Amino acid sequence: MSFAARLTLSIVIIVISLAMSAVVIISVLDNGPGWLHFLTYIAGGLLAFGIGSLASTLRSRHATEDIDAERS
């Protein structure tokens, strides 16, 4: 997968998790069902995965640039 695709996917996952967190927290504060709180754990997991994926993507990009610099 290309750098741009991995970067886009990471950012989309982070945005979805933040939006999901906001919707769930607002729903719970407005006396929503108690089971809805479980979705905050899923959103937190998505956020952690998105941040980890973003860090991995950016690190692999810098590693590729370093290898290309050594070759020239």
Image (spheres, rainbow, N blue to C red):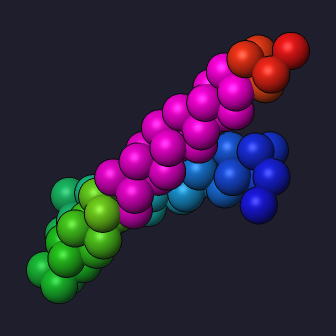
* Outermost residue, front side: 71
Q: Quadrant of residue 26?
A: bottom left
* Outermost residue, right side: 72
The answer to whether 72 is drawn above or below residue 1 in the figure is above
Residue at the image position 55 percent from the left and 57 percent from the top: 13
The answer, for residue 47, to whether it is visible in the render is no
Q: Quadrant of residue 37?
A: bottom left
The answer to whether 51 is drawn above or below residue 26 in the figure is above
Left or right: 48 in relation to 63: left
Residue at the image position 70 percent from the left and 27 percent from the top: 67
Locate the N terminus and report the quarter of the image it occupies: bottom right
The answer, for residue 63, to whether it is visible in the render is yes
The answer to whether 19 is drawn above or below residue 45 in the figure is above
Name the residue nearer the viewer: 16 or 29. Answer: 16
> What's drawn in magenta, residue-wise?
46-67
Left or right: 8 in relation to 35: right
Residue at the image position 30 percent from the left and 63 percent from the top: 45
* Outermost residue, left side: 34
Residue 60 magenta: yes
Residue at the image position 40 percent from the left and 57 percent from the top: 49
Q: Position of residue 35 (x, y in %)?
A: 17, 84
Q: Position of residue 9 (x, y in %)?
A: 66, 56
Q: Position of residue 38 (x, y in %)?
A: 19, 77
Left or right: 20 in relation to 11: left
Locate the C terminus and report the quarter of the image it occupies: top right
Predominant secondary structure in magenta?
helix
Name the residue nearer the viewer: 12 or 27. Answer: 12
Q: Position of residue 44 (x, y in %)?
A: 28, 58
The answer to whether 55 is drawn above or below residue 41 in the figure is above
Residue 51 magenta: yes
